Image (cartoon, rainbow, N blue to C red):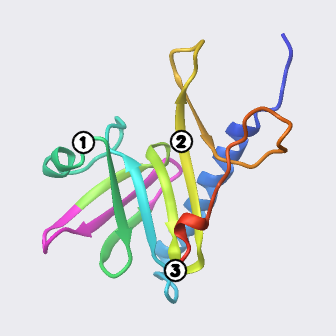
Amino acid sequence: MARSIDYGNLMHRAMRGLIQSVLTEVAEHGLPGAHHFFITFDTTHPDVQIADWLKERYPTEMTVVLQHWFENLSVTDEGFSVTLNFGNNPEPMVIPFDALRTFVDPSVEFGLRFETQEQDDEDEDEEHIEVEEEPERQAAEVVSLDQFRKH
């Protein structure tokens, strides 16, 4: 069987490591300057822990904002937990890195998008980070920061 380098998986791990490092820094020192994050995640992921009313309101995905009010941010190798305020109602949540769909810091026009695609010949989903490749190669996926730019 031919071996090959799994660039998609390596890129995924690297991007999750980047997010882990950023969130760890924020947990230890707070958000610097105008930085803030929009984090979208899959609420159906089995390790996501959110209040039942949030799961009912956001049955497939949810975007949270880490900006003005958040508490108890804790980061592990698997994900992070945080308490956010929903209409003066603090709600703790646990979000594994595997559940992330997007991570955006609009203050510096930075964004990552993770997508899940079903493989035709396998039952399990393959997650990948979108990366740009040369046009003559197989269909490339591109990280576009334009959608996050301030107008």
Amino acid carrying mark 2 in the image: Glu
Question: Number of callouts in the render?
Answer: 3
Callout in the foreground (3, 2): 3
Q: Residue at x 76, y 38 (%)?
A: 7
- Residue 3 to residue 105: above or below: above
The stretch in magenta equals 75-91
Q: Amino acid at mark 1?
A: Pro
**Above or below, 17 relative to 25:** above
Q: Inspect the magenta stretch and tell me whether residue 84 lies in it.
A: yes
Q: How far apart are the alpha carbons under marks 3 and 1?
A: 31 Å
SS of the residue under disc 1: loop
Circle 1 sits on which residue?
59
Task: State the separation of the CA atoms marked 1 and 2.
Answer: 18 Å
Query: Which label is found at residue 115?
Result: 2
Mark positioned earlier in the residue sequence (3 or 1) = 1
Please state if 12 lies on the left or on the right of 94 as rendered.
right
Q: Earlier in the sequence, mark 1 or mark 2?
A: 1
Q: What number is the disc on residue 151?
A: 3
| Alpha carbons under labels 3 and 2: distance apart | 26 Å
Which residue is pictured at 47% across the width and 81% down the height? 31
Of labels 3 and 2, earlier in sequence is 2
List x then y, in percent, for residue 137. Answer: 83, 35
Give the farthest residue toward the bottom.
33
Which of these two is toward me, 104 or 81? Answer: 104
Q: Image quadrant of residue 141?
A: top right
